[in-house]
Image (cartoon, rainbow, N blue to C red):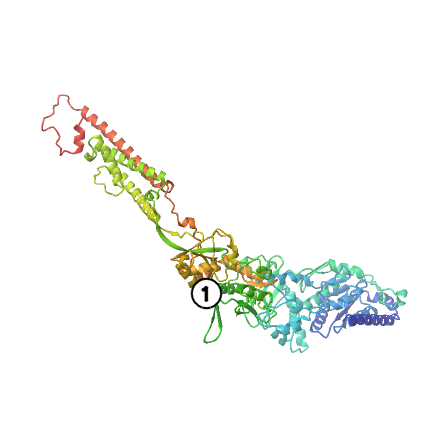
Amino acid sequence: MQLTMELERLARIFFLLAMFHAFNSIDWSMAQNTHHRRRHHIHVGVILDMESPVGEMAQQCTTMAITDLNASASHINHHLKLILHPRNSMGQPLKALSSAVDLLENEQVEALIGPQTSEEAELLAELGDRVPIISFSASSPFLSSDKNPNFIRMTTNDNFQVGAIAALVQEFGWRELVIIHEDSSYGNGIIPDLLLTLAEGYGWIVTDGIVNELPVMDQSVLDSMQGVVGIRPYIPPSERLCNFSLMWRNSFFRNQHHQIPDINVYCLWAYDSVWALAKAAYHLSPITSMQKNDAANKLAHLAAIPSRPTGSDLVCTILSGKFMGLSGEIQLKNGQLQQPVAFEIVNIVGRVKRIGFWTQSNGIMRGLNRSSVATQSPSVRKMASIEWPGSSLAVPKGQRFMPKTGKRMRIGIPIKRGFKELVGVELDPETNATIVTGLCIDVFKAAIDLLPYEVKFDFIPFPNSTTGSYYEDLIYHVYLQQYDAVVGDITITANRSLYVDFTMPFTETGIAMIVPIETSRSANMWIFLQPLTVDLWLVIGAFFVFTGCVVWTIEHNDNNEFKGPLSQQIGMVMWYSFSTLFFAQREKLTSNLSKVVVIVWLFVVLILTSSYTANLSSMLTVHQLQALPKGESIGFTVDSKLVRTDLINVPFKNPSFPPLETVGDCANALRDGSRNGGFSAIIDEIPYVKVFLSKYSAQYTMVEPSYNSTNGFGFAFPKGSPFVPDMSASIAKLREDGKLHLISQNWFQNHSLFTNQDSATKVARLDLYSFRGLFLITGITSTVAVTVSYKFRKKESTTVQHEVADQPVEEKFSPVSDIPSRRTSSKHIRRYSY
């Protein structure tokens, strides 16, 4: 390959030497004799690939630009005339170079428009220090005005569209890109690769180099590109552009073309290049023709061509100019067009359909307002519907993962006799297909669905192990790349991580203990005092006495049942207050105030007695965990080597490790007990414990141990697999959205909480703090009632004293008739008993 390139380079050099030697015999004095006659004529060379549709259309546009320039009423038309000298490069860089030399030597051009490709422009850049070169289609970033000051790029740099492509990739959630390009500085070679590999399930994004040529492509090519998404510079509409489009169609109609191609942006840039050159030449002084360089005639290389006196001035004038062209505002910076105000996002669906825009400030949006760069709300910042390859409306998830062993992922699955709620493998008797179910399978499928690309996989059950370490052998098969992943109840360990990469755990981490629940009764003779704390007992007793005193204070003056000797009244206070505990009070109350006090107190008594009864019942008969004395047997499931390692320092004298394969085996072993060949408890990882409790939660419970824990279950992939971070992110998303909990509930029911052994055997005592509100209510009620009763009695006593004082002193009471009878109301008794 390198030898071929060197030979081609040598051929170019010899060709140039021969060509320039022939041109040395030209007499440059003709230019001096005709200077005055041609000083207002600017000769411009146009180098295009006339064999290509773009070159043919660009030549037509430059011709129309000259026509419009000559027909315009501007001062340029009166003082200046541009004469174009087109040359056909036939798409060959050497041909383009020979055409440029011919134009410089024979036509004495003052500027070159073209070349068409970046490869041709790079070769002609050596002439840039002698004549300005204006290219409307060479968009390679390697062409820079820093190296070639007289090179002007009347097109956008390819780097400008990188932001739009990145925004599309982010919008669709794709993680990887495959870049297809021609191994040259010009990228139209992407089309053959595009047509050969276009399929369903892929998303294609093409750059403006292809999108700009879509109008001149055959319909068969467009049909094969259905669903492709592309970007291209946005050309704002204008009245001038509309008129040019009509002229464009009319020109093809007059030439009797069967198919009129749509105008592409290259045509507009070619048109604007002619006008930019004309405006710059108009602002310069009259062109001074080239002087013959006798010394140059003796040279036989590229330096024989003299520089144009106005070349650098013409470039500076073009770069500093600013005007409205057909393609929009023309303003050059760093020798090239500035970044477009926006890029159009298009979708090929039989035709080129616009689906949105991208701007550097606002990103992707549905449309632009009249002021071009629009600030739109997030609600409208989305593209129109896209039809992807295969006429699908769903966004492709990207390239499928192709493991080395085949086109579909081979997922190893452990085969288990028990605990099939985690992983269950069954064989369909009718179809002979393998049916895989369980928590691990559901989580794996849900995580796969969240990936931003499509993954095809097959579950492959792992046969019996020959070494006795089933799960270790399964992991080792992933290390040997016989499986692309392992899904199941695979515990994450440091040793296994040496051979495979694990995702983040999708189950609870740690181990737990299953113990039987037994019913026992307390032998404490003072247990009836334990439901309440000491301070609560004292406060309750004080309020009993306080409430009785309040009722006696209100009732004893008017109610005979609260009268009598002092000892009888003290007994009445104590009896009445404590009888409210059983709602057994028989004394009738005459005052409304005392009735209010008693009603409130009865409510307090009801709350207290109910709480006491409930707490005492819990203390008398509790579900407590059976104690595990040292020397008792402990059971484990089949794959419990990991748990046994954690239990080396457990406080049991002789822990036994016979394997338990199914949930039924665990239940039978616990039911028999350690004295009958069974176990007093079973210790294992939390997922296994939950599976057991989903069926035997009435007889057994789960206790959180105080010793080491494990790291939970994870999916195992080969070392360095790109699936590990993606699947971990999917698992985290499932956990955040609550879907992981729902999947767990579907298989484990509701056993996500531990039962602490200490909390299970103790019942909290009721304290004063819990009932402070009740005592505050009854205390305030009683105090207010006593205060109101005292004030009312005092006021009434003062009224009676005034009535007695107003009676005559000599009035005598009748010994019989004037004495109030016992049937007289208490009001009269009170009035005459002084």
Which residue is labeled 1 in the image? 418
Query: Residue 238 at what x, y percent from top left?
Result: 63, 64
The percent position of residue 38, horizontal first and vertical second, equals: 82, 67
Q: Nearer the viewer, residue 799 or 748?
A: 748
Give the x, y percent position of residue 233.
Answer: 65, 64
Characterize the local packing of mark 1: few (<14), some (14-19) or many (20 or more) Cα atoms within 10 angstroms: some
List x then y, in percent, for residue 563: 20, 32
Which residue is most to the top?
810
Label 1 sits on a secondary structure element that is loop
Residue 168 higher or lower than 819, as above or below: below
Figure quadrant of the N terminus? bottom right
Give the amino acid at mark 1.
Gly
The C terminus sits in image quarter = top left
Query: Who is closer to the viewer here, 249 or 485?
Result: 485
Q: Is residue 790 left or right of residue 752?
A: left
Q: Nearer the viewer, residue 638 or 536?
A: 638
Observer-nearest of 234 and 802: 802
Please state if 565 lies on the left or on the right of 473 as rendered.
left
Residue pictured at 90% horizontal, 65% vertical: 295
Q: Total of numbered circles in the picture?
A: 1
Residue 168 visible in the shown view: no
Q: Is residue 430 visible in this depiction of the protein?
A: yes
